[in-house]
Amino acid sequence: MTRATPPPHGTPGRLLRDIANVVNLSTPLGLIIAAATRSRIRRRGGLIVADRARLPLRNAAAFTVGSVVILPHRDLERAESGNPALLEHEDAHAWQYAYCLGLPFIPLYFAALAWSVLRTGDRASANHFERQADLAKGGYPAHPILPVREGIRRLMRGEVRL
């Protein structure tokens, strides 16, 4: 799946996205999470980055809420040293918040995550939003698609981890 390159920082398109994510309340929610987790907040490439977030998440390199990228337990430089394309991947999620009209993105994302787990045993491989943001840029491997029946069997046997 190919994806159009997002407009560079400061372009009218990106400004419109960022305004939409403030109006649709997703960026304010991201800033509340950043403040509640005592993150260091800064701007980078048209995004607000909240790094060193104190969250109990261990398996997420980063996650985005509106135009806010939250990095649990580490700083941006360390995250980018492990995955130089991480912010580009998270930038795509900021666009997804805008086109999903903000907070509806969250249940839609979790529905796509559940579908992916069912179809691949993995939270990202068949997740529409992760595929659209480019799996490789997010640091996700692509797992093969399973028949639904096989996915249900794996879930019932407890073979699937999130």
Image (cartoon, rainbow, N blue to C red):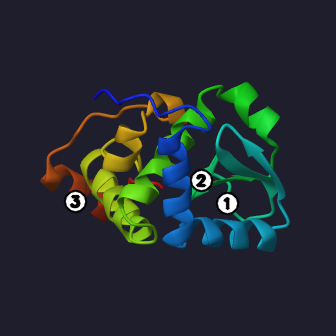
The answer to whether any part of residue 162 appears in the image is yes
Residue at 37% from the left image edge and 32% from the top image edge? 142
> Where is 140 relative to 73, above or below?
above
What residue occupies the far front of the structure in this picture?
A: 12
Q: Which residue is mark 1?
A: 57
Helix, strand or loop under label 1: loop
- Near mark 2 (Cα within 10 A), the count class, few <14, some 14-19 or many ≥20, is some
State the CA–CA distance, disc 2 to disc 3.
Answer: 27 Å
Cβ–Cβ below 8 Å for labels 1 and 2? Answer: yes
Residue at 28% from the left image edge and 57% from the top image edge? 115
Earlier-in-chain disc, 1 versus 3: 1
State the CA–CA distance, disc 1 to disc 2.
Answer: 10 Å
- Amino acid at the residue labelled 1: Leu
Residue at 41% from the left image edge and 52% from the top image edge? 96
Q: Which residue is mark 3?
A: 152
Helix, strand or loop under label 2: strand
